[in-house]
Image (spheres, rainbow, N blue to C red):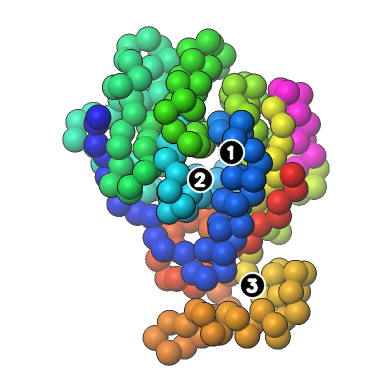
Amino acid sequence: MKQCEIGNISELDYSGTEALNTISSNLIFAGKEKKKIIFTSCDAGDGKTYTVLHLAKNLTKRGNTVCVVDADLRRSVMMRNYRIHTEDEPVGLAHYLAGYSEITDVVYETNISGLYLVPVGRLLVSPIQLLDTQALDDLLNLLASKFDFVLVDAPPVGLVVDAAVIAPHCDGCVLVFSYNKTRRREIADAQRQIKQSGCPILGGIINNVSVDSFVAKKYYNKGYYKHYYSKYYTENGKRVGESKKRGKMGSSLNDGNSYAYRLWCG
């Protein structure tokens, strides 16, 4: 099998890790038939790709095998933003759907144990004709027979129709929102498009949330949460919670002072 290296998946802080633990548990509890999961958002920059890669890594830590499919054939940022390197020119989804490559050519084993990747391959101006084919269904079904989870990173459904075309080939959909950015009307429109495709919506993930602005006020008594936060997550002798910077799960978290939370609907 071909090899690739993912060089930029930073470690999450305590609250981000706990959020991903909960999301992973909900995916597992959704049922064994929910294996092909599409992730989409309302807009670019909502943290969808970052969420998919971190969630995939979290699932592998539980002993699952996961294949991530980069299905953003128009404007993928996965290879560049997360420093994913292959030995040769990457062959991926676009090549397979166009009939130029076999599945053995497009599935890469990564440097993270249990995590596999189907890269985008090449970008296309109008990929609908390739996505709306039996080939995509065949690919996802074959991957689902080989891996415990297939996570499909699709373009924002609020910008292009690609996600709505891919969704019928999946067992469920997870919508990714950005806190204090995504509007209710945009969320409603995204839900409507996915529901019209016939793909069940499993839930939603809220990104770009600080503990002080959301978790402590909405879900826990502030003193209670800070007790656990200060006990389990400190950095260089200083509580990370003292930083007022609001982190974004959808971008690089190299400073370690970023937070994320989730809202699971399904």
Q: Which residue lies furthest to the left in this view?
A: 87
| Occupied quadrant, residue 109 | top left
Earlier-in-chain disc, 3 versus 2: 2
- Give, as a three-letter code, the residue at label 2: Val
Spatial CA distance of label 3 from label 2 is 21 Å
- Give, as a three-letter code, the residue at label 1: Phe
Q: In this view, does 31 lie above or below 179?
A: above
Please, what secondary structure does the residue beneath circle 3 have? Answer: helix
The answer to whether the residues at label 1 and label 2 have Cβ atoms under 8 Å apart is yes
Mark 2 burial class by Cα count in 10 Å: few <14, some 14-19, many 20+: many
195 is within the stretch colored magenta: yes
Mark 1 burial class by Cα count in 10 Å: few <14, some 14-19, many 20+: many
Nearer to me, 44 or 31: 31
Please, what secondary structure does the residue beneath circle 1 have? Answer: strand
- Residue that numbered label 1 is attached to: 39
Residue 69 at x, y percent in the picture? 45, 32
